[in-house]
């Protein structure tokens, strides 16, 4: 648990203590200088030696101390009343010494109290307090003018300047504090919005793909249920499997969100885990197999030396591929799409391309492309999506992934090559055929290539349908269940 540094001394002590120390010091000093100490040749007109000889004067001086100390004790709880007591005590002190003005040093305690008033009270109340102090100074100046005592230079204008400065300092402190609180509130609100957007993107990428696969499989099963009951049964099994996986992910997400809500009431010592399944590029092969079983062949091409990526880049890359493949299934009308994953020196390049209609960019009302663009922007990458000049639709993302920032051992985990998922029929299960050049990307090791040409090239094994009628019916189901997430 981190320990916050101690506050400065000026902030640890209550404001009333500072006011009381300053006022009492300025009030005790003339007593020691002109009353207690032995008589000297010099004298003071403001503090005559016999000024406190009468019991009335001594009583007034004692009353001034009581008023000021009471005001200092109440300054934090009853600020306005406490400030009035400090001003009243200062006036009574001048009456005890039979002074016709407030000594400048004695007014410093009032200035400190006014600074605190301007810091904690609304501007109108603090202006009233400052006006009260200025009014007292003006009253002393007017009394001297009426009595005809205009000897020397009046100190009230200079003391009025100290009152204004004290109010300005307190008001600036209050504005700075208000601005800081506003910034903190705005940052907290933006953090909440960012977290909501992150959860929305995760839910969209996870649920939308699964629901799309379920819709395609259910449509295919409905069309072949009478002619090919076995195929329909296999399609419904896939529907059940996808539904259970989606429910499991949602339960895990909700459970993690509840844990995060409990952690929010206590100081967290580490980052809160992601509310969804920990997925990454290692799941691309499973995604390709599931999508192929739904009726669209997915060719996955791995290029460059595969290495361990940071968790945010790995997750973002998989979500972009997942959403792009789901969009291709729903919108393109094509029978296949290609996924290229290129491990470059300082970045990861992803391209998903299909040969379909290339629509979905004009009257699009979904959040798929928006979510992908947000993911890439958060990682300071580049994202493009749009129709290709030669037909089809392409999604391209460049994510920063420098090798120096990764936990690489210098050895590739798999050679570059192409892995294609092969199926017997559109609504049936999947069968993965590894390339001759090496192992599939799901494997962790690297197998030496059998031929030199196959190391850097790509191979695609076309899907072989055992029943052409079933394939036609699946494509019809695909067109019927288009739900517009792009």
Image (spheres, grey):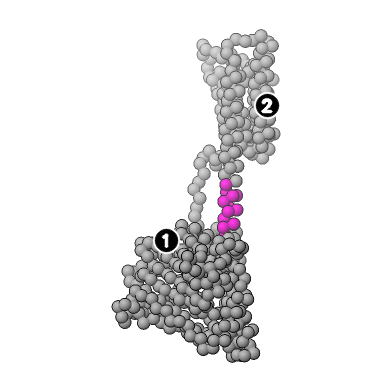
- Is 190 colored magenta in this rendering? yes
The answer to whether residue 266 is above or below residue 13 is below
The answer to whether residue 20 is above or below residue 219 is above
Magenta stretch mostly in which secondary structure?
A: helix
- Locate residue 310: give its quadrant: bottom left
The reply to whether residue 485 is in sight is yes
CA separation, marks 2 and 1? 64 Å
- In front here: 63 or 261? 261
Q: Secondary structure at mark 2?
A: helix
The answer to whether residue 49 is above or below residue 310 is above
- In front here: 42 or 482? 482
- Quickly name the residue at label 2: 132
Frontmost of labels 2 and 1 is 1
The reply to whether residue 428 is in sight is no
- Quickly name the residue at label 1: 400
Whole-percent x and y of residue 20?
A: 60, 32
Q: Secondary structure at mark 1?
A: strand
């Amino acid at each position: 648990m981190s320990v916050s540094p101690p506050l400065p001394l000026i902030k640890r002590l209550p404001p009333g203590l500072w006011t009381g120390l300053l006022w009492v010091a300025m009030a005790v000093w003339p007593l020691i200088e002109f009353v207690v100490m032995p008589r000297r040749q010099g004298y003071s007109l403001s503090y005559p030696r016999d000024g406190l000889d009468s019991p009335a004067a001594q009583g007034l001086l004692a009353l001034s101390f009581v008023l000021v100390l009471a005001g200092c004790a109440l300054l934090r709880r009853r600020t306005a009343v406490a400030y009035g007591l400090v001003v009243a005590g200062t006036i009574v002190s001048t009456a005890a010494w039979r002074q016709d003005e407030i000594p400048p040093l004695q007014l410093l305690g009032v200035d400190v109290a006014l600074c605190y008033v301007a810091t904690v009270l609304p501007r109108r109340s603090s202006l009233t307090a400052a006006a009260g102090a200025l009014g007292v100074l003006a009253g002393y100046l007017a009394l001297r003018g009426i009595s005809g005592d205009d000897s020397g230079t009046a100190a009230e204008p200079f003391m009025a300047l100290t009152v204004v400065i004290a109010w300005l300092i307190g008001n600036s402190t209050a504005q700075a504090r208000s601005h800081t609180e506003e910034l903190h509130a705005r940052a907290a609100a933006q953090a909440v919005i960012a977290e909501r957007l992150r959860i929305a993107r995760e839910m969209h990428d996870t649920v939308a793909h699964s629901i799309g696969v379920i819709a395609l499989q259910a449509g295919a099963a409905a069309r072949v249920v009478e002619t090919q009951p076995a195929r329909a049964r296999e399609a419904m099994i896939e529907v059940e499997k996808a539904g259970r996986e989606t429910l499991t992910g949602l339960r895990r997400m909700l459970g993690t969100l509840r844990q995060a809500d409990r952690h929010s009431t206590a100081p967290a010592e580490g980052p809160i885990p992601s509310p969804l399944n920990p997925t990454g590029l290692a799941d691309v092969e499973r995604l390709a197999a599931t999508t192929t079983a739904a009726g669209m062949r997915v060719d996955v091409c791995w290029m460059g030396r595969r290495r361990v990526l940071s968790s945010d880049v790995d997750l973002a890359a998989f979500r972009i591929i997942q959403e792009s493949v789901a969009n291709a299934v729903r919108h393109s009308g094509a029978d296949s799409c290609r996924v290229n994953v290129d491990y470059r020196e300082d970045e990861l390049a992803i391209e998903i391309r299909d040969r379909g209609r290339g629509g979905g960019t004009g009257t699009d009302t979904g959040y798929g492309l928006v979510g992908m663009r947000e993911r890439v922007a958060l990682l300071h990458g580049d994202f493009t999506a749009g129709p290709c000049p030669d037909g089809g639709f392409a999604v391209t993302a460049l994510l920063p992934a420098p090798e120096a920032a990764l936990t690489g051992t210098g050895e590739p985990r798999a050679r570059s090559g192409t892995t294609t998922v092969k199926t017997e029929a559109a609504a049936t299960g999947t069968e993965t055929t590894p390339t001759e050049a090496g192992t599939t990307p799901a494997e962790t090791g690297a197998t030496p290539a059998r031929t030199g040409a196959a190391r850097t090239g790509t191979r695609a094994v076309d899907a072989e349908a055992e029943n052409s009628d079933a394939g036609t019916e699946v494509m019809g189901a695909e067109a019927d269940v288009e739900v517009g997430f792009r």
